[in-house]
Image: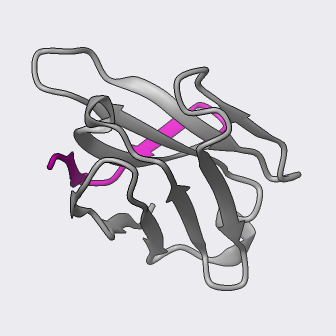
């Protein structure tokens, strides 16, 4: 069922911004559009945690730790999901993963590294 490819990670100073993108490749719109999309992250030595999600109806949820700083969005025409990250903190350092859920099936990307450091 296609492939999820993340991009946009990198090194940024505290207080800076990054925009992550996730492209769903090899799937058709009738599969992407009803999918629930997620951004997760995993820091070294820690469990993977949910950062944000967006439903097919564009209902958005956020972890308390990123509320007011991160914004998730989706572009169904191009089968992409983005995560705008503002006011980044060192504790946001992690590998960020895109995930797609449709019915009982869940698919993951390979992840993109975000490092927040001065």
Which residue, as the protein is rendered here, is positioned at the far right? 57
Residue 25's place in the image compared with 71, above or below, is below
Residue 41's place in the image compared with 31, above or below, is above
Left or right: 54 as drawn, with respect to 109: right
- Relative to the observer, which residue lies in front, 53 or 8? 8
Question: Where does the image place residue 82, in percent across and percent down from the top left?
Answer: 55, 64
Left or right: 68 as drawn, with respect to 63: right
In magenta, the rendered stretch is: 102-118
Residue that appears at 25% across and 55% down: 13
Residue 56's place in the image compared with 63, above or below, is below
The reply to whether the magenta stretch includes residue 6 is: no
Toward which corner of the image does residue 79 lie, by quadrant? bottom right
Residue that appears at 51% across and 33% down: 51
Question: Where does the image place residue 61, in percent across and percent down from the top left?
Answer: 72, 33
Q: Quadrant of the N terminus?
A: bottom left
Residue that appears at 55% across and 33% down: 66
Question: Where does the image place residue 103, in percent across and percent down from the top left?
Answer: 67, 37
Which residue, as the protein is rendered here, is positioned at the far top? 46
């Amino acid at each position: 069922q296609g492939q999820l490819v993340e991009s946009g990670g990198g090194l940024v100073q505290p207080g800076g911004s990054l925009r992550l993108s996730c492209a769903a490749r090899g799937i058709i719109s009738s599969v992407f559009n009803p999918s629930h999309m997620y951004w997760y992250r995993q820091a070294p030595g820690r469990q993977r945690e949910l950062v944000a999600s967006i439903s097919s109806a564009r209902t958005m949820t956020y972890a308390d730790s990123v509320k007011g700083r991160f914004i998730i969005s989706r572009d169904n025409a191009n089968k992409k999901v983005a995560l705008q990250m503002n006011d980044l903190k060192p504790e946001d350092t992690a590998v960020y993963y895109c995930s797609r859920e449709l019915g009982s099936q869940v698919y993951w990307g390979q992840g993109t590294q975000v490092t927040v450091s001065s």
